Image (tube, helix red, strand yellow):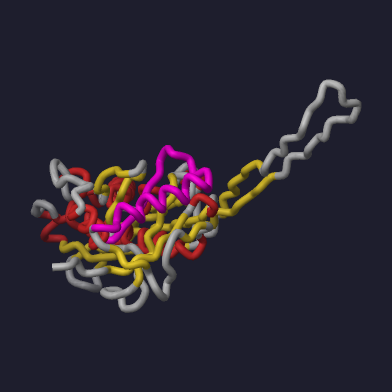
Amino acid sequence: MALEHLKPEIWSQNLLERLNDKLVYGQVCTREFEREIEKYGDVIKINELGTIAVNDYSSTSTSALTIQTLDDAQKLLKIDRAKYGAFWVDDQDLASATPGVMENAINQMAWSLANEVDEHIATLYSEAGITVTGTSAAGTALTSTNVLKYISLIAQNHDEANTPLEGRWIVVPPWFAHKLIMNKIVLDTNNTGILGSGKLGNYYGFDIYVSNNVYHTTPATDGEAAVLSGYKGSIALATQVLKTKVQDTVTVGFKTLVKSLMVYGTKVIRPNNLAVAWFDYTAEAS
């Protein structure tokens, strides 16, 4: 069974599946362009129509209709990031089919790659078209007594920006989530499966996700947090495990080398429907 896991095609498939399971920010992105990836450096063209003007009409008017030429609003999703993982597997473990060797290796590799992708997506706060509250220098103080107010304010900003209601999301750091729990918005019942994917619950029409990768200014333990929100069409993500190689080696004992290459790209495709709110952790009153 362990030897079967060393087939490159099986390794790549399992790795990509588990990587997707471990993404948090990756869950809130549109992945519809992923199938177009073939190699590092690919550029995926995302075509959108520009705004269509609406004009007054009168049945008694003799003026000609104003005819508009549709303009393409094209965005480019560049596959411009590449990461790899590589490790040795002891041939004795493979020969004896030591339980869990490859399963643990796949999980560890997937976690590391997913963490890299999520950390990058979290930095896209700089491209958000909406700033709800606070700044990177002075975040808004957040407590369990005002957390509802600011989630409501985030929702209001999205409503005013005509952000679609379906698929709205917020990604918050753990300390933000605990303030929600303290406010009893999210009941701590039957959450095992939900928390496994980073999803805490739903409130004010937002799916609320929890991630340690929410961007914080320096120092990370006491910095301002850039809480991103949007809907599933705000950010595009495309990722692929392009290559997996399994190689025997005679230079380092009796070991087998396993290495995988992942490429990915991100693009904020609807900045007017992506919001950042800067928050500062505030201790609760005793």
Residue 62 in the image: state x and y as whole percent: 91, 26
**Looking at the figure, which quarter contains the C terminus?**
bottom left
Report the number of numbered marks: 0
Residue 123 in the image: state x and y as whole percent: 42, 65
Image quadrant assignment for residue 82:
bottom left
Residue 31 in the image: state x and y as whole percent: 44, 45
Image quadrant assignment for residue 213:
bottom left
**Looking at the figure, which quarter contains the N terminus?**
top left
Closer-to-camera residue (21/203): 203
* Residue visible at 25% across and 65% down in the picture: 87
**Residue 6 seen in render:** yes
Closer-to-camera residue (219/84): 219
* Residue visible at 42% across and 37% down in the picture: 166
* Residue visible at 36% across and 48% down in the picture: 27
Closer-to-camera residue (285/57): 285
Residue 103 in the image: state x and y as whole percent: 18, 52
Q: What stretch is highlighted in magenta?
A: 145-173
Left or right of 233, for residue 25 = left
Q: Which residue lies furthest to the top in this view?
A: 59
Q: Which residue lies furthest to the right in this view?
A: 62
Residue 112 belongs to the span the image colors magenta: no
Q: Residue furthest bottom?
A: 219
Residue 160 belongs to the span the image colors magenta: yes
Left or right of 107, for residue 17 = right
Closer-to-camera residue (19/25): 25
**Residue 106 seen in render:** no
